[in-house]
Amino acid sequence: MTGVYLIRKNSHVLDIIVTMSIFLFIGFITYRLSIGLNYRWDWGVIPNYLFRWDAVKGRWVSNILIDGLLTTIRLSIWSILFATVIGLVMGIVRTRKRLFFRLLGRSYVELIRNIPPLVLVFIFYFFVSDQLMMILGVDEFIRNLSGTASTLLTLLLAKPELFTAFISGVLTIALFQGAYITEIVRAGIQSVDNEQWEASAALGLTWLQQMRFIVLPQATRRVLPPLANEFINTIKYSSIVSIISIQELTFQGMQVMSSTQRTNEVWLTISLIYFLLCFAVSLAARRLETVMAEVRL
């Protein structure tokens, strides 16, 4: 008991030391910016770019930073959905016995994981914009939508004039993250004991029934933590598409920085918003893990 008490006491002291060190580091950085670099903080400009008063509507409305946050959320949600579908399908393909399927899944993973996401953004943007969308006539169709359809499209995806760039960004992030989710799903499926496969086969279940009722439910519990991490990475990787003028949070932050010259205030605000968004996803994933563990028990 004495040993356990000493360990807990030492851990508590270590936590205090680490916390104080972090605050001292933050204080040092603030001092260097304020005194050493003669930087004058001005946080008063930030709230004006979060919300503004609309005299016509007679109420407060979102300004460009909040609009950028909403675009980031939409971009992340669609990317996560497509990446999950791609990762699930390709992860299952990678566990199949036939050589063709395993080569297909392996080729996708190795190709995507070994190409920088920035390069993928440009490839998909110019291919989707200049080739695919033009051939299919999607861009013209989107621009000619009625008022109600255009409003719904803006709410769920992006403004009609930004639709092509938005889809390019979603496809890029989804394919990039899908490669990592593929490996997570593959590892989860292969972690299920062979006895589970043999027992379910002995019961006369087909392969699809084995995956649906036996293997995937067990694999899901095991892959949930790394999947949550990839969902958070998807949110952070969404900032990459700012280079193709998708008006997400990072892009809007650069616009504000350019007009106000408040570099530190803007980027600290952007960092805080990203942190709160990612932290909320982390808490939701943790809660889901707890619920699934209780169901299993």
Image: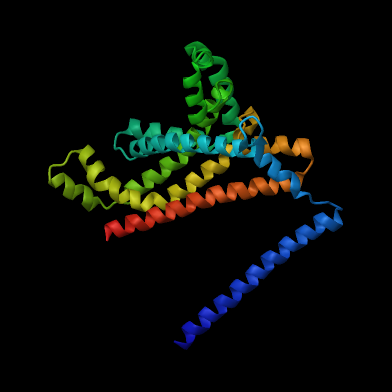
Q: Position of residue 263 (x, y in %)?
A: 76, 44
Task: List x then y, in percent, for residue 222.
Answer: 36, 53
The reply, left or right, for residue 34 in relation to residue 121 is: right
196 up-or-down from 152: above or below? below
**Residue located farthest toward the left when viewing the structure as drawn:** 203
Q: Residue at x 33, y 55 (%)?
A: 292
Mark yes or no: residue 58 visible.
Answer: yes
Answer whether residue 106 is visible to the viewer in this image.
no
Q: The N terminus is located in which quarter?
A: bottom left
- Give the left or right position of residue 102, taking residue 17 as reference: left
Residue placed at 22% from the left, 43% from the top? 210
Q: Which one is nearer the viewer's eye here, 19 or 132?
A: 19
Residue occupying image coordinates x 81% and y 58%? 32
Residue in front for this viewpoint, 148 or 158: 148
Name the residue: 59% across, 72% down: 15
Q: Is residue 2 above or below residue 28?
A: below
In the rendering, at what x and y percent does residue 179 appear? 46, 38
Task: Locate residue 148, reporting x and y percent.
Answer: 47, 21
Q: Choose top left, top right, bottom left or bottom right for residue 28.
A: bottom right
Q: Which image quarter is the C terminus in? A: bottom left
Say left or right for 17 vs 205. Answer: right
Q: Nearer the viewer, residue 187 or 98?
A: 187
